[in-house]
């Protein structure tokens, strides 16, 4: 097996396939761990954690402490991010090597259906493969009107952290990435304006969840410009102006684009192998993640499915199982509708499975129960009683269909509902679990009553 791209999809496919007996070579041009570790999940959450530590210190007197003082040190923050990335790269590389995976530092491309070349510092390395896995990921989308320079006009990749903290950051795009960057920079001390193309941030999410986040943003002084699409950025000596399609404009010191990503599908030899791509450049795959050439599999963002690191990892494992013939045994296909996801804002947001709004749109009968954290002992102890747990179940059978959580540690708590949804557990299974007290998870049991 030859794998091009060592992000979560590539390295999980490599580890499991090697464990199952394959001879595996993994080609990576940057770092093993991929964009997920270098640019996306890890540095963004590390910056958010630092911002939250600052916010927490600001509230220290409410916890019975005297007023502490702390200020942001961008150099120390950059060092912290690099240290985390180094440790993760080291552990991921160690795991791959312990399974006997051959690592090649270079840029890979198909030269035919069964042949791959890795361009390395020492010249090209030619490889033959029975199975190829393409897991080259994606990168930020940059529209023609955005003069990205990495200094004032930034993509998410220029912001870990930026050379100077923006005085006034204009975030363009109010999906998951956009709102996380609003939270991050507001917590670190920047003034932030968010350009929202619709009338609600997080347009794909439960309106009640989005409203909780908007309330938090407004209470922290974030300006929301709704119903506007950015279409030009003019950079001056001291700042910039973002112009929108409805004639409005916003002045700021910096702008950050968070308007989606595009697949890394150019230059990897898809034509040479006859692999089909869709109009957006994503590789067309079947439910086994096989491309139009069955022994060429695709995992992660390049597959055009759900762009999450957790999903990419699971796809990598499913590819290894399928390629090694385990699909001939009872085997569960990946069900993207059961993927849990989280948004690392404050309050944190997480959801999984069927959403209340989608059930109503489909005319499906559901039972929805909602419990606010304001009645949770642990939330009061934490001095953070914001948010709620919402559980969606089948009124006839009690089977848990989905849920959303807004509040502290939502990304951790959602795993209980995710397990219930995947294993088709009943609400009584949650109610009858003897949970910890005092703990935020008590609200889950209450919602399941
Ligand atoms: C700002 C941001 C924050 C995010 N936060 C989260 C989060 O908190 N949780 C979450 O689940 N998801 C998050 N995501 C999404 C997540 O990062 C992606 O879904 C995930 O990284 C996709 O993994 P992948 O395996 O497709 O590859 P990637 O992680 O994109 O890695 C692909 C790898 O392939 C390498 N590569 C590309 N072309 C070649 C080539 N020709 N030869 C050799 N190597 C090559 C690249 O160098 C890279 O290392 C975030 C995304 C963004 C933009």
Image (cartoon, grey):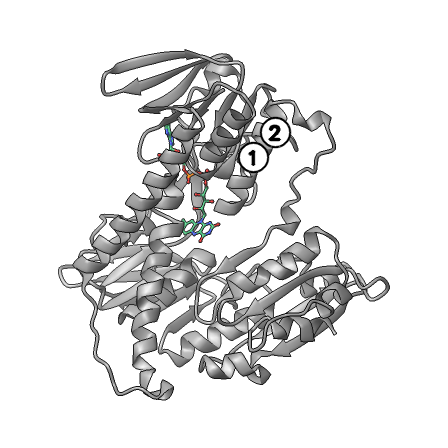
Query: Is label 1 within 8 A of ligand 1 (CB to nearest ligand atom)?
Result: no
Quadrant in the rendering for residue 220: bottom left
Q: Is residue 429 left or right of residue 438?
A: right
In this orientation, does residue 110 appear?
yes
Q: Residue at x 33, y 13 (%)?
A: 125
Instruction: List x then y, in percent, for residue 290.
Output: 60, 26
Q: Residue at x 51, y 61 (%)?
A: 411
**Which quarter of the rendered picture does the C terminus lie within?**
bottom right
**Residue 317 shows which numbered tag?**
1
Instruction: List x then y, in percent, for residue 400.
Output: 73, 61
In this orientation, does residue 385 appear?
no
User: Crowdedness of circle 2 by 10 Å Cα count: few (<14), some, many (20+)?
Assistant: many
Query: Is label 2 within 8 A of ligand 1 (CB to nearest ligand atom)?
Result: no
Q: In this view, does 212 lie above or below 99?
A: below
Q: Is residue 199 left or right of residue 97?
A: right
Q: Is residue 282 left or right of residue 359?
A: left
Residue under pointer 2: 321
The mark total stands at: 2
Instruction: List x then y, in percent, for residue 301.
Output: 49, 39
């Amino acid at each position: 097996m030859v794998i091009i791209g060592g992000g979560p999809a590539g390295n999980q496919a490599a580890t499991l396939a090697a464990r199952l007996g394959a001879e595996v070579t993994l080609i990576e041009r940057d770092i093993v761990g991929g964009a997920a570790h270098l640019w996306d999940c890890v540095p963004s959450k590390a910056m958010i954690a630092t911002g939250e530590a600052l916010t927490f210190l600001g509230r220290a007197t409410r916890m019975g402490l005297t007023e502490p003082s702390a200020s942001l040190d961008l150099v120390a923050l950059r060092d912290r991010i690099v240290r985390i990335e180094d440790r993760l790269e080291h552990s991921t590389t160690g795991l791959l090597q312990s399974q006997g995976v051959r690592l090649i530092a270079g840029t890979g491309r198909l030269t035919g259906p069964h042949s791959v070349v890795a361009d390395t510092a020492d010249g090209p390395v030619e490889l033959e493969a029975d199975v190829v896995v393409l897991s080259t990921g994606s990168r930020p989308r940059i529209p023609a009107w955005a003069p990205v320079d990495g200094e004032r006009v930034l993509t998410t990749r220029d912001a870990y952290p930026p050379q100077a903290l923006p005085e006034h950051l204009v975030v363009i795009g109010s999906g998951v990435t956009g709102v996380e960057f609003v939270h991050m920079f507001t917590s670190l001390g920047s003034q932030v304006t968010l350009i929202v193309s619709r009338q609600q941030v997080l347009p794909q999410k439960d309106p009640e969840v989005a409203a909780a986040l908007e309330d938090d943003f407004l209470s922290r002084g974030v300006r929301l410009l709704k119903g506007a699409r950015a279409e030009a950025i003019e950079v001056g000596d001291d700042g910039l102006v973002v112009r929108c399609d409805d004639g409005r404009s916003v002045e700021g010191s910096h702008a950050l684009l968070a308007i989606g990503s595009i697949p890394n599908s150019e230059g990897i030899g898809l034509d040479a192998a006859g692999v089909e791509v869709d109009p957006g450049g994503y590789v067309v795959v079947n439910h086994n993640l096989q491309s139009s050439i069955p022994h060429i599999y695709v995992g992660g963002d390049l597959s055009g499915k759900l762009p999450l690191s957790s999903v990419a990892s699971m796809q990598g494992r499913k590819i290894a199982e399928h390629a090694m013939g385990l699909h001939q045994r009872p085997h569960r296909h990946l069900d993207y509708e059961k993927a849990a996801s989280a948004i690392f804002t404050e309050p944190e947001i997480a959801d999984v499975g069927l959403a209340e709004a989608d059930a109503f749109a489909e005319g499906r009968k559901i039972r929805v129960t909602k419990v606010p954290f304001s009645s949770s002992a642990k939330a009061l102890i934490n001095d953070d009683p914001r948010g709620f747990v919402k559980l969606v179940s089948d009124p006839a059978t009690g089977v848990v269909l989905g849920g959303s959580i807004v509040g502290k540690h939502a990304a951790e708590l959602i795993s209980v509902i995710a397990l219930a949804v995947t294993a088709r557990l009943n609400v009584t299974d949650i109610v009858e679990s003897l949970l910890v007290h005092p703990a935020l998870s008590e609200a889950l049991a209450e919602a399941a009553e």
